[in-house]
Amino acid sequence: MSEGAVSPPFSFSCSVHKWGEYWVRSERPYFFVLPWIIGFVLFTGGPILATIVLSFTRWDLIGPPLWVKAANYVRLFRQGSEFWTVLRFTAFYTIFSVICSVGWALFEAALLNARKARGMGLFSFFYFVPAVVPMVALTFAFQLILHKELGILNYFLTLLGVREGPNWLVDPSVVVWIVVVLNIYTFYAGQMVLIFDSALKEVPRELYEAAEIDGASRVTQFLRITLPAISPIVFFNMVTATISSLSTSFTLLYPLTAGGPGKVTQAISLDIYHNAFKTFRVGHACAESVILFSIAAVASFFMFTTSKKWVYYEV
């Protein structure tokens, strides 16, 4: 090379520059999701792993956790354990709550879509009140309505000639059905009405007109046209209602019955709170939390597996 000529730039700087551009293009998207990742690790993933680990320990929130292996699970499932009563009520409450809430929401949405129905707009407003009213306030209102001495329900029964109304929240044979029925007037039940209402509006009217020409009754149209058309929405609401019944039952049961009388209305979510923050058996409560998570996972897997036989998606 002749004197005075400028030497080409060192190739290393070009490589660094290209690598920097590639890193910016490939890694920049991760910065946008980094807040969610941090939140998931700190508030969801981390607590889940901690719960699983603590379920194998004995801990009272004061001293250090003591490793006891599977002793908490053995204690829960041993013969004569009160946990079996809790499991039976949880299964009963979840199954009938899902049936009642999904069925009632679909019935209300069908009424809202009926051509000759009047006053449905006002009725839907009152039915959707739980979506904007705190659940605790609703449960206190239910307590007043069902009170044996001051409740308006027993007052109406006296007008019908019943001298002494039942004690709705104390009678074990009645209270289990009361909490199931009240579950249809909760937040997610109101949400399901809106979802069903939107789904029913998307069903082609030509199908109903063709069915009417063929002489199909309203019941046949509902079973053969409406249900298959909205089956994905029914499936979605069933899954969300199942998970909500398992996880949010505490919000309804604790202010209303506190698990009583006895442990007749003690769901797993309520039992977890009792063991963790009243008797300070945190390991025991964590074991119940793992069991509750497993029940929700198994129930969801079962519904997803069986949905192939009755859920119809557009091709």
Image: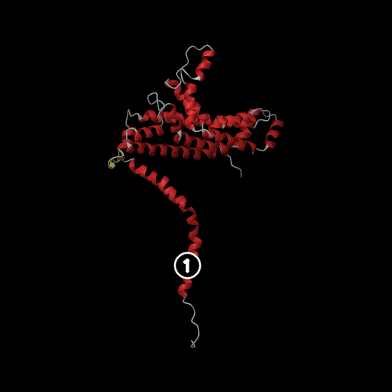
Q: Is residue 39 left or right of residue 65?
A: right
Is disc 1 surrounded by few (<14), some (14 to 19) or many (20+) residues within 10 Å? Answer: few
In this orientation, does residue 229 appear?
Answer: no
Q: Is residue 264 above or below residue 65?
A: above
- For badge 1, the amino acid type reads Trp
Q: Position of residue 1 (x, y in %)?
A: 48, 86
Residue 105 percent across, percent down from the top left: 56, 31
Q: Nearer the viewer, residue 231 or 192?
A: 192
Where does the image place residue 132, in percent across and percent down from the top left? Answer: 54, 34
Residue drawn at 43 percent across, 29 percent down: 255
In the displayed structure, 296 sits above or below 253; it is below
Judging from the image, what secondary structure is the residue with disc 1 in?
A: helix
Could you tell me which residue is drawn at 46 percent across and 70 percent down?
16
How many numbered markers are drawn? 1
Q: Is residue 202 left or right of residue 50?
A: right
The quarter holding residue 246 reads top left
**292 lies left or right of 123:** left
Q: Is residue 180 or residue 40 the one in the foreground?
A: 40
Query: Colour scheme of this structure image?
Result: secondary structure
Kindly indicate the quadrant of the structure image that contains residue 261: top left
Q: Is residue 275 above or below residue 9?
A: above
| Position in image of residue 33 (x %, y %) | 48, 53
Q: Residue at x 61, y 37 (%)?
A: 198
The answer to whether 254 is drawn above or below residue 59 in the figure is: above
Q: Work out whether residue 220 or residue 171 is closer to the camera in this orientation and state it.
A: 171
Left or right placement of residue 241 versus residue 194 in this view: left
Residue at figure coordinates x 47%, y 50% from the top left: 36
Q: Tell me the quadrant of the picture where the C terminus can be found.
A: top right
Q: Which residue carries the number 1 mark?
A: 19
Residue 119 appears in the figure: yes
